[in-house]
Image (cartoon, rainbow, N blue to C red):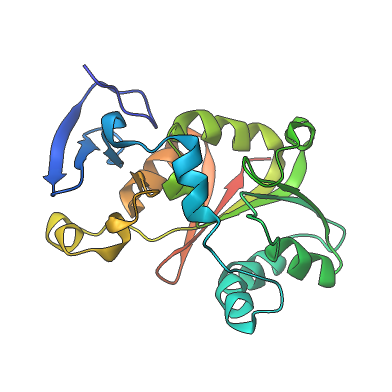
Amino acid sequence: MISCPLCGAESLGIYHRDKHRDYWQCHQCHLVSVAPAFHLDAESEKSIYDLHENHPSDMGYRRFLSRLTEPLAERIPPDAHGLDFGCGPGPTLSLMMEEQGFRMAVYDVFYFPQKTVLESTYDFMTATEVIEHLYSPGQVWQQWLTCVKPGGYIGIMTKLVKDLDAFTRWHYKNDLTHVSFFSRETFCFLAERDALDIEFIGSDVILLRKSQ
């Protein structure tokens, strides 16, 4: 029996199958995940990320990230210290937050793999277009909760599952590095389980605050 990679429940059912992969859904947390047999190896995964051209000088990319940075900056104290998890080869969100006076650390399993930054605690952490790539989202989620101080924020950007009909036509699932697909129900499940306040901003920004 395959258990849910997020909540650990053994209540998975087939959600969708296409010519590339099988997708399962957890009946407890509603996460849609790619069956492990279809996960890429690390080298193949990184070769796809190496094709990304996100860079701090790209104003379009900055506007994209501002959908998270702007509402987050409104909610954190001016001297807040943050962590950008999964920053990629050209850290940009961290630079944008530093330009507003916040202190930042960065981590990326491929490009900035200094695990010592994960041993500190922060007033906030961000993960933009990261959570859908996680093979073990439950393990990483617990890591994030540990990294954020009481009263601190976790800011996430990811496209959300709406329903099966939309999923079958969804371009987002066609990226072979995308393996964990969250919905509003999934984030609400996590918020209730882990005592987090939750806000959905627009179509793909989620802010979660730890209880004091």
Across and down, in percent, residue 102 comes to 83, 62
Report whether 169 appears left or right of 158. left
Residue pushed farthest top?
A: 1
Q: Is residue 33 left or right of residue 148?
A: left
Question: Which corner quadrant holds the C terminus?
Answer: top right
Q: Residue 211, image x and y in percent? A: 62, 41
- Answer above or below: position of 98 versus 14: below
Query: What residue do we see at 28% from left, 57% from top?
Result: 174
Asked if residue 100 can be seen in this view, the reply is no
Q: Residue furthest bottom?
A: 59
Q: Residue at x 62, y 43 (%)?
A: 110
- Quadrant of the image occupied by residue 140: top right
Image height check: is 179 above or below 158? above
Residue 118 visible? The answer is: yes
Residue 57, compared with residue 133, is above or below; it is: below
112 or 143, which is in the foreground? Answer: 112
Picture residue at 77% right of the left edge, 30% below the top? 119
Marks counted in the figure total 0
Residue 168, image x and y in percent? 15, 58
- Which residue is found at the position 46% from the left and 44% from the top? 45
In the rendered structure, the answer to whether residue 163 lies left or right of residue 79 reads: left
Quarter holding the N terminus is top left
Whether residue 7 sits left or right of residue 74 in the image: it is left
| In front of the other: 9 or 173 | 173
